[in-house]
Amino acid sequence: MPDRTPAPPAAWPLVALFTSGYVAPYLLPTVVGRLDAHLPLSPAQAGLIGSVLLLGSAAAGFTLASRIPRLGPRPLARLGLLLAVLGYGTAAATAQLPLVVAGAVLGGFGSGTATAVAASGIAAQRDPHRTSALGLLSVSATAGALYLTLPRLGGGHGLPFAAIALVALACWPATGRLPGADRTDPTGRPEDTDPAVRASGRLPYPRAGVVLAGALMLWSLAQNALWGVSGRIGAQQAGLSEVTLGIVFAAALGAGLLGVTAASLLGSRLGRAVPVGVGTVVIACCVVLASHARDLGSFAAGEILWNAVYPVALSYAIGLAAALDPRGRWAVLVGSASSLGVACGPVTGSLLAEAAGFPGMGLALGILLLAVAGPMAGVALHVGGRPLTPGSVRRRGGAPAAVLAAGAGTPAGSVPRVGAQELEVVELPQLRARPLRLPPLRVLLPSPTATRRGRDRARRRVGADV
């Protein structure tokens, strides 16, 4: 039976989509700061608009988690980029508050759609950690360049929105390398008519996935609560100008590039538990340091060290989510939970800062990060490897002996996939049996003379008996 399993998509289109989807959260401080400075909004209201933008992104992920293969990565990616261009372009072109909010929500849904497609494709890669690290390198470099450029292009609330829309437009050509809709299962039957396919659609590692999703939501909430008010901390508490803040943020994102590069080189040598757990503890200390900063040195030290460690831990967390399910469903759901935390971050940071001040806010967020470090590391220890996928069986040239032994009683040409909570049939190429060759059969036949003599003897024997 021919193998109809689709090949994983190329890495660079996924990196481009990842960049388009994540650039909006990375630019959140300047988006919120400019909304506060150039529109009749309070800091809490500006943070709420940032949260609404990211809520749209999270809603896209939760909506599309199980629909990406059926609808197709390429159409969904193009729809997401189109919504991002229209939404952020509308928010940039007008100063009317209802249109700004509507454009932010629409653009956020487009960014979330692009992120969901990227996360699903990254989970299907041979090395999802490496691809996610490349994505973080790309978005850090893009956001760093924008932080250096935007302060020199003038004021106004629309400039960051316009920059995000242009990034989405620039990523459009990458969608041509993504696959279309896949409406057949590996046996070639329509997906919707096979009850076995529908029955095997349960998510593997349900408890680990739920714990990781909840922990990463709080993890992202804590960090983006600080990230959403970092501009205010630098301007109001540390006394820095917008140009100086842009330089500090660009340097911080540059440190993130170095951190992700180091994580990409290390790969799986340290496992996932150490980078996720220890990295979260270091991030908690950086959050407290940055929130207590009252001069350029302490503020820059906290922001730079924090942004150097944050993408490292995030890349391993994304790889961990991809390891839970090679179809990418947990990667999309965990990413959407993270987006939900990111969405609640700005308004949480604003409310905590107004209630307890910047130092009190940082202390509360640091305690929250320490509380989620243990569960995230526990999931990383529990899930040590990836489930066996059809591609891995195909690349290894067959299945291990234990898998073949477990396949007794399954249909010919298939073995069960292991490593998940359920058994799922994976089609393998049929092996052609070599024909058995036997030596030629030799038959000895009597000659005509011998035949006549035999007849004569038989007649004489009959006559003698009579």
Image (spheres, rainbow, N blue to C red):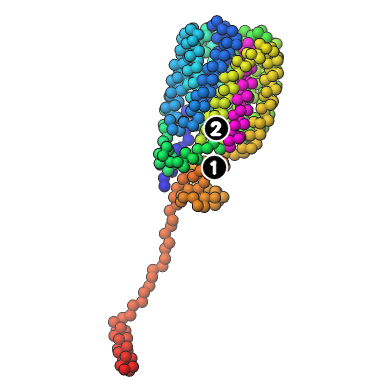
Mark 2 is surrounded, within 10 Å at the Cα level, by few (under 14), some (14 to 19) or many (20 or more) other residues, namely: many
Name the residue: 50% across, 13% down.
101
Q: Is 406 contained in the magenta span?
A: no
Quarter of the image for the C terminus: give it. Answer: bottom left
Find residue 330 and name its label: 2
Image-based side of 84 in relation to 269, left or right: left
Work out whether residue 26 or residue 248 is closer to the camera in this orientation and state it.
Answer: 26
Is residue 320 shown above or below 100?
Answer: below
Quarter of the image holding residue 189? top left
Work out whether residue 11 or residue 37 is closer to the camera in this orientation and state it.
Answer: 37
Q: Which residue is mark 1?
A: 422
Reading the chain from its start, which is encountered first: label 1 or label 2?
2
Q: Main SS of the magenta segment?
A: helix
Quarter of the image holding residue 40? top right
Q: Label 2 amino acid?
A: Trp
Mark 1 is surrounded, within 10 Å at the Cα level, by few (under 14), some (14 to 19) or many (20 or more) other residues, namely: some
Is residue 289 shown above or below 203?
Answer: above
Could you say where residue 240 lies in the image, as x and y percent from the top left? 64, 8
Work out whether residue 326 or residue 152 is closer to the camera in this orientation and state it.
Answer: 326
> Can residue 127 be seen by looking at this rendering?
no
Work out whether residue 447 or residue 110 is closer to the camera in this orientation and state it.
Answer: 110
Name the residue: 45% across, 19% down.
83
Q: Secondary structure at mark 2?
A: helix
Magenta segment: 205-233
Find residue 156 and name its label: none
Could you say where residue 195 lies in the image, as x and y percent from the top left? 45, 41
Q: Is 210 contained in the magenta span?
A: yes
Q: Nearer the viewer, mark 1 or mark 2?
A: 1
Quarter of the image holding residue 323? top right
Name the residue: 48% across, 14% down.
102
> Can residue 363 be seen by looking at this rendering?
yes
- As measured in the structure, the alpha-carbon distance from the residue carrying label 1 to the one carrying label 2 is 16 Å
